[in-house]
Image: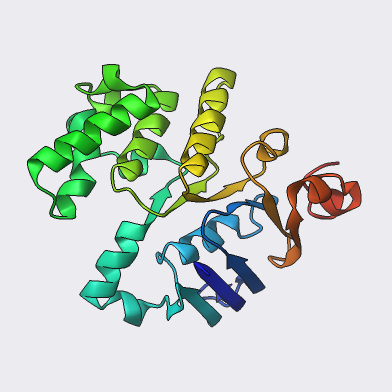
Amino acid sequence: MLFELSDVDYRYSDGTAALDKVSLGVESGDRLAILGANGSGKSTLLRILDGLLFATSGSVQFKGQDLSERALANPQFQHSFRQSVGFVFQNADAQLFNATVYEELAFGPRQLGLGEPEVDSRVKDILRFLGIEHLANRPPFRLSGGEKRKVAIASVLTMNPEVLIFDEPFLGLDLRSQSWLVRTLNQVSDVGKTTIIATHTLELVSRVADTLLILSELHRPLACGAAPEILANIDLLTDANLVE
C-alpha cells in the first residue's frame, strides 16, 4: 500500500473542519480522482497526501511509515518521500521561478544531487516526451497558461516520482490543452506511475481515473468505487453538488 489514511480529520486554527473522517487506500499504479464541489476539501486532502499539511487527528501512512511533521523532519525520510511524490499545483505560477524552461526542469534533479550529464538527459527526455522541446529556452513567465501547465508537469516528471498528484489540472485549459493533458496522464499511467487528481470536471474524469472518491460539502467521503458506477449514480452526484 502506498498511502493509507484512517479517520483523517483536518481543522483550521479556528476549529472549522476541512476534512472529516476520511479513510482511503492507494495502491501502486492506481488512477484515483477525488471529486467534490468547491470547498469540499479536495485540495486539503491532496496537501495531506503530499506532506504539505498534517492531519489534526487520524493516521496517514506512506509505504507503512507515518507521514507526519516529525517524520519529515528526518532528512533521510524527507529525501525519499520528496523523490517519490510529485505535486502539480492548480496555479502553475506557484511552482515556476527559474529563468528558462530548461532550468525549470533541471532544478529538481539538481536538488537530488544528480550530475549534469544525468540532469541534461532527464530534461531532454521529458521535453521530448511531452512534445515541448520548442519551449526549452523560453522564460516561463512569457508562456501561455496552457504552456505553463505543461512546464509545471514536466518539472515534476524530471524528478521521476512514483506518485503524481494534480490539483484541478483541467481548470482554465482550452479543449486542445485538455486533450493533451488526458493523453499525458494516460502515458504516465502506462509506465506504471500512480496518479491522484482532484477535479470537478466530470466529462473528462472517466478518461484519466479508474477509481473515484466523492467528498461531500460536509467534507466527508460520500462514496469510493469504480468510476463507471460512481458516474452512473446521478443521486450521488447530485448530493455532492456535482450535477444539478
Residue 63, image quadrant: bottom left
Can see residue 172? no
In the rendered view, does 60 fall on the left or right side of 150? right
Q: Residue at x 25, y 65 (%)?
A: 79
Task: Using the image as rendered, state which of residue 144 and residue 112 is in the foreground.
Answer: 112
On screen, 242 above or below 135? below
On screen, 142 above or below 188? above
Image coordinates of residue 155 in percent, x first then y, are 31, 40
Q: Residue at x 46, y 78 (%)?
A: 64
Residue 82, image quadrant: bottom left
In the rendered view, does 140 fall on the left or right side of 43? left
Image coordinates of residue 97 in percent, x first then y, are 24, 39
Image coordinates of residue 228 in percent, x first then y, are 79, 45
Residue at the outermost front position: 191
Residue at the outermost right position: 235
- Colour setting: rainbow
Count of numbered circles in the view:
0
In the rendered view, does 122 fall on the left or right side of 226? left
Can see residue 181? yes
Residue at the outermost left position: 116
Q: Residue at x 28, y 69 (%)?
A: 78
Q: Residue at x 20, y 30 (%)?
A: 102
In the rendered view, does 94 fall on the left or right side of 120? right
The quarter of the picture where the C terminus appears is top right
Image coordinates of residue 46 in percent, x first then y, are 51, 58
